[in-house]
């Protein structure tokens, strides 16, 4: 389906769970979900071509959860941070700066997570730690899929845990912004 790989439905992946929770407080809220696997594999892609409409969306918040498909072998932290800066800068567009939240790697890659932490520190973005969630079997879709790669993705419980982590920082930040 058109949702997180191992979630059982769209309503149970973290992006949709986050948007649903935001809509409880702000019923007219909208969201744009950008699938970033191509960016993860090629940090230098043309953001305008890959993510049409993202710049014009004028988001109040950007939740960055990309890195799983970035190759671990030969990982270049500086190139990754520069890629984050280009992508988030593009999505932010002109005008008021959105709230930026950056999540570490669910799959436990310390190098990728350190790069994301470096970005967050440099740009005063809220950091969402996910490595501990991915380390727990109950947060993965183990036994639900024959393909080991899919089964290692967050299942419904993992998606809920990721959404909860994001919401812990996103909701107060949005409340402050909307006040």
Image (spheres, rainbow, N blue to C red):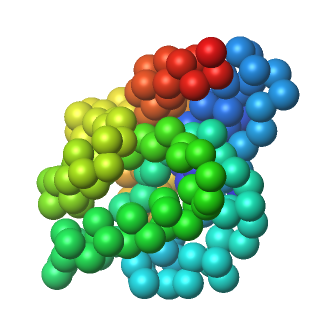
Judged left or right of residue 23, residue 13 is left
Quadrant for the N terminus, please.
bottom right
Residue 166 shows in the view: yes
Judged left or right of residue 142, residue 49 is right
| Place of residue 165 in the rendered image (x, y in percent of width and height, measured from the top left) | 41, 27
Does 142 sit above or below residue 82? above
Quadrant for the C terminus, please.
top right
Q: Nearer the viewer, residue 11 or 36?
A: 36
Judged left or right of residue 130, residue 76 is left
**Residue 52 appears in which quarter of the rendering?**
bottom right
Residue that protrudes farthest toward the right in the picture:
28
**Residue 7 appears in which quarter of the rendering?**
top right
Q: Nearer the viewer, residue 150 or 55?
A: 55
Residue 106 shows in the view: no
| Place of residue 46 in the rendered image (x, y in percent of width and height, measured from the top left) | 55, 84
| Place of residue 124 in the rendered image (x, y in percent of width and height, measured from the top left) | 31, 41
> Tag count in the figure?
0
Q: Residue at x 60, y 31 (%)?
A: 18
Q: Residue at x 59, y 45 (%)?
A: 96
Q: Nearer the viewer, residue 117 or 159?
A: 117
């Amino acid at each position: 389906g058109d949702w997180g790989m191992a979630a059982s439905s769209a309503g149970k992946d973290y992006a949709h769970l986050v948007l649903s929770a935001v809509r409880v407080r702000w019923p007219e809220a909208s969201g744009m979900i950008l699938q970033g696997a191509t960016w993860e594999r090629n940090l230098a892609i043309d953001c305008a071509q890959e993510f049409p409409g993202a710049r014009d969306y004028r988001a109040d918040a950007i939740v960055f959860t990309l890195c799983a498909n970035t190759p671990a072998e030969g990982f270049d932290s500086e190139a990754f941070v520069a890629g984050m800066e280009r992508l988030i800068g593009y999505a932010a567009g002109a005008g008021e700066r959105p709230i930026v939240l950056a999540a570490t790697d669910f799959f436990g890659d310390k190098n990728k997570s350190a790069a994301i932490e470096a970005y967050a520190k440099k740009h005063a973005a809220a950091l969402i730690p996910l490595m501990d969630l991915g380390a727990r079997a109950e947060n993965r879709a183990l036994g639900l899929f024959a393909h080991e790669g899919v089964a290692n993705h967050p299942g419904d419980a993992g998606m809920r845990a990721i959404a909860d982590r994001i919401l812990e920082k996103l909701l107060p930040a949005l409340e402050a912004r909307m006040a």
